[in-house]
Amino acid sequence: MHNRWHPDLEPAFRVKPGAELRLECQDGIAGQLGPDSTHDDVSLLDLGLAHPLTGPVFVEGADPGDTLCVDFLAYEPDSFGATPIVPGFGFLADLFPAPYLVKWRMAGGRAISDELPGVAVPGDPFAGVVGVAPSRERMEEFRAREERIRTAGGPVADAMPETAIPSEAADGLRTIPPREIGGNVDIRQLVAGSTLFLPVDVPGALFSIGDLHFAQGDGEVCGTAIEMRGAVTVRFRLQHSSIRFPQYRTPPRPGREHFATTGIATGEAMDIGGAARLALLEMIGYLEREHGFEPPAAYALCSAAVDLRISELVDVPYPLVSALLPLDIFAA
């Protein structure tokens, strides 16, 4: 396992294109929470240990400028999952400053929790972090770009080299953001039957994966999904053409019935973030009123199951964001 992107990590596996590989993954919280954990334990999390990844996988024939095609064939979930609300982290961190933990039991393809009685979230497992190694040049380019963001007052994850695994990757990149080579993309459509396309930056691509989620809403609003350990089976193919950013293809899916709230930010023109915030607050209020959930539990449920969608982006001056709640989670 490793928790930094680095081009000099020794491959853990070597495969030919067309090969299938089953990879066992730790959860994205590095096993720091379990069935006996409490709300207070969330405050003790060492976030520098986040996203232990399985890999790297050296794919023979993959050269810089190629595209690595990753077919997701199957996921094998664990029986325990966690959705922690970490102080200072999440879309509504200013409104939810206290640690909170929703613990899930997974069986029969659904997740249930004592913190959310009457809810059973259908499993839709996927990998939150998936990517390939950057070249040395690109690693420095990314580092310089993020330092400019930090200097301008923007949020950037601290390097925390003392928590790097292995220690020789201490000068590598944190896995917190998505980048051109993949990373913490949190694309919940990367389920079994999907294909992810990644730009190859180094010989062999050096593919890694982790941060498995049992289920997640689009946006992962509290900062975590239903975090779990488990296994994923993938197959690798190559295309000898280049792409700039990750791309993906999804399997066909039947529809689900939803209830939705909306948000329209009227204080500032074209404020998508403000509209998303208002739609989410409306949904949390709905879950409080209609289902009696504590506000932090409702917030965690939104991160696990509610999808934020940009419904309208062109009708100036107010874009509209919807928060969609799948109603089949209340079939417990």
Image (cartoon, rainbow, N blue to C red):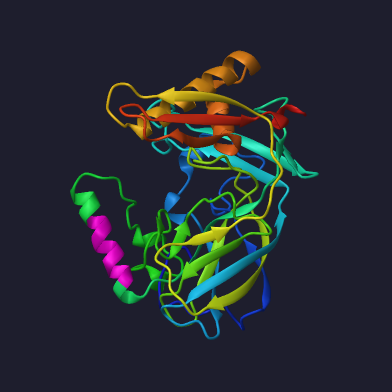
Visible in this render: residue 1? no
List x then y, in percent, for residue 282: 49, 20
Q: Position of residue 263 (x, y in %)?
A: 44, 24
Residue with the most extreme right position: 108
Query: Where in the figure is residue 56, as x and y percent of width and height?
Result: 52, 73
Identity of the residue furthest to the top in this view: 289
Q: Nearer the viewer, residue 182 or 25?
A: 182
Give the position of the N terminus as an image quadrant: bottom right
Q: Is residue 287 above or below residue 40?
A: above
Looking at the rendering, the stretch of residues picked out in magenta corresponds to 138-147
Q: Residue at x 53, y 86 (%)?
A: 61
Q: Is residue 164 visible?
A: yes
Q: Residue at x 43, y 68 (%)?
A: 243
Residue in front for this viewpoint, 170 or 15: 15
> Is 141 covered by the magenta stretch?
yes
Q: Is residue 51 left or right of residue 179?
A: right
Number of callouts:
0
Q: What residue is rendered at 69% in x and 74% in y?
A: 20
